[in-house]
């Protein structure tokens, strides 16, 4: 069964976990043999921007030195054979150009989302 993970709420839990939980879960499930694809939309399209970094953050005596590296995590999914779709209009709304993004993404228009949903047996929206 083919599953589509739609990630729309960007940067959820990235302070606590240093990873987006859904991206991490997709890596783990793909490694276990699941057939998964990802659709990034809304603020989650920012995960595909190559030039981003997170400086260390201190809260009281606790210092978080290892920020999330989401472009690498998404590239890793593509490297494992996960198709990663991105909504073009969401990129445009944020002023993001193709040359700023990681490679291997599948760009779709909002109007194409229903066909993408129908091509999967299950859809999980995060």
Image: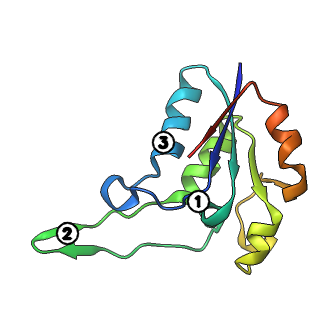
Return the x and y of residue 37 as percentages of the image width and height: 70, 37
Q: Earlier in the sequence, mark 1 or mark 3?
A: 3
Q: Residue at x 78, y 29 (%)?
A: 120
Mark 2 and mark 3 lie on one chain; the one further toward the N terminus is 3
Between 73 and 13, the residue placed more toward the observer is 13
Say which residue label 2 marks. Answer: 63
Mark 3 sits on what residue?
24
Give the x, y percent position of residue 56. Answer: 30, 74
19 versus 100 height, above or below:
above
Residue 16 occupies quadrant = bottom left
Q: Could you tell me how far apart the alpha carbons at marks 1 and 3 are, in whole angstroms? A: 12 Å
Q: Given the current orientation, which residue lies at the most extreme bottom position? A: 95
Q: Residue at x 28, y 74 (%)?
A: 57
Residue at (75%, 41%) from the top-left corner?
83
| Res. 71 mark | 1
Spatial CA span between label 2 and label 3: 22 Å
Task: Of the two numbered discs 1 and 2 on the same chain, state the one appearing first in sequence.
Answer: 2
């Amino acid at each position: 069964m083919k599953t589509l993970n739609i990630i729309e709420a960007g940067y959820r839990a990235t302070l606590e976990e240093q990873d987006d939980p859904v991206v991490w879960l997709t890596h783990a499930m793909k490694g276990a043999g699941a057939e998964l694809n990802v659709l990034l939309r809304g603020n989650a399209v920012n995960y595909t921007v190559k030039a981003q970094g997170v400086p260390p953050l201190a809260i009281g005596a606790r210092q978080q030195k290892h920020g999330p590296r989401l472009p690498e995590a998404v590239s890793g999914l593509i490297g494992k054979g996960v198709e990663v779709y991105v909504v073009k209009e969401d990129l445009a709304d944020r002023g993001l150009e193709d040359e700023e993004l990681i490679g291997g993404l599948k760009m779709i228009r909002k109007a194409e989302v229903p066909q993408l949903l129908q091509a999967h047996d299950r859809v999980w929206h995060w």
